[in-house]
Amino acid sequence: MFDSMLLFKSLFSLYLIFYGYDGEYFIPEKTGYTDVLISFQASVNIPLNEYATFHAGIIGTEPYAEKFVATPYLNIDFKLKNSLFEIGNLGIGLGKKLAILPEEVIDYGLFSSLMAKDGAWYKYYYNNFSFNSWFLWTQRETVTLQEHFIGGLLSEYKLKYKEISLDTKVFFNISHYGGQFYNNGPVIQSTNPGAEVKFRIGNFFILSRGILSQVRNQFGVANGFGSVYSFGFNKYNFLFSLNYWKNNNYYALEEDTIFKRNEVYFTKLVFSKELIYNSNIKTDLRVDYSDNDWGGYLGIYLEYKL
């Protein structure tokens, strides 16, 4: 029997993201802040052959207290045996796709803030091994803005025996500010190699992540190191973690402000649940302590895919 709805879903796709965020501090020297981000991605999907699909559509984004911005969405993806490849505009929700930070630590707002960038992404997967590589051109050079691109490599291997698992990751990220045709801003290049290990028994886990950083500019070279340690558990729809971050002159590629501070103790409580019609919700509560300052935030992350 002909399924018209299945045909519609194969030719048309819709992706919606809503992220609401409220941060508060418990000392008079700092003030709270609120952020809301609404984004959608709608496209027509045109099969070119059994491996390649062309996507054409529009991406709309409305950050909090800013004007609505619409950009064209043009993308070609290739699906081969054990591998995926995309080139063009990589769409919204890139932080989730690229797995830049561990779920136990990340601010879910990064999932939604890193989006709608031109570039390329490749993933290979086989049994317990996966490899990701990506390149994003985040800013074209203008008279007032420098050219900016970021890229990365990530390999992951998982071992599992009954309720015991070991997940290891090795990664390398690069960020480059340049473009000297119209803009005379300083050339800044940073690299961040690192590794992560997560050990899990049943619902409990221990995670350790170490990241080197090197920044090159007209003043010379600066080296640094950052590390994060996490202990927690997953049960039903909840994730709870106790975390510690230490910064030794580390230059943060990540936008989460945790990684821009010297030393932070923080807890996270995440509730996630799949809803009806390919939608899901996450609520993210974090409380942190740094330099005798208490703070925290509550975030709500909603996404829907058709």
Image (spheres, rainbow, N blue to C red):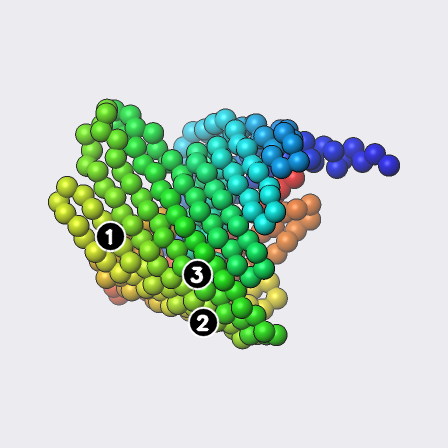
Asked if residue 43 lies left or right of residue 277, the reply is: left
Q: Which residue is mark 3?
A: 169
Where residue 50 sits: x, y (%)?
A: 66, 36
Gap between marks 1 and 2 measured at Cα: 27 Å
Where residue 231 sits: x, y (%)?
A: 44, 71
The image quarter in which residue 211 lies? bottom left
Q: Which residue is mark 1?
A: 214
Asked if residue 243 lies left or right of residue 178, the reply is: right
Where residue 212 sits: x, y (%)?
A: 29, 58
Name the amino acid type tagged 2.
Ile
Q: Which residue is mark 2?
A: 206
The image quarter in which residue 114 lies? top left
Q: Are marks 3 and 1 in contact (CB under 8 Å)?
A: no
Identify the element where label 1 is drawn. Answer: strand
- Which residue is rendered at x = 49% and y = 35% of the image? 87
Note whether 210 is above or below 96 in the view shown.
Answer: below
Closer to the camera in the image, 247 or 192? 192
Note whether 76 is above or below 190 in the view shown.
Answer: above
- Which residue is rendered at x = 51% and y = 55% of the image? 130
**Sequence-earlier tag: 2 or 3:** 3
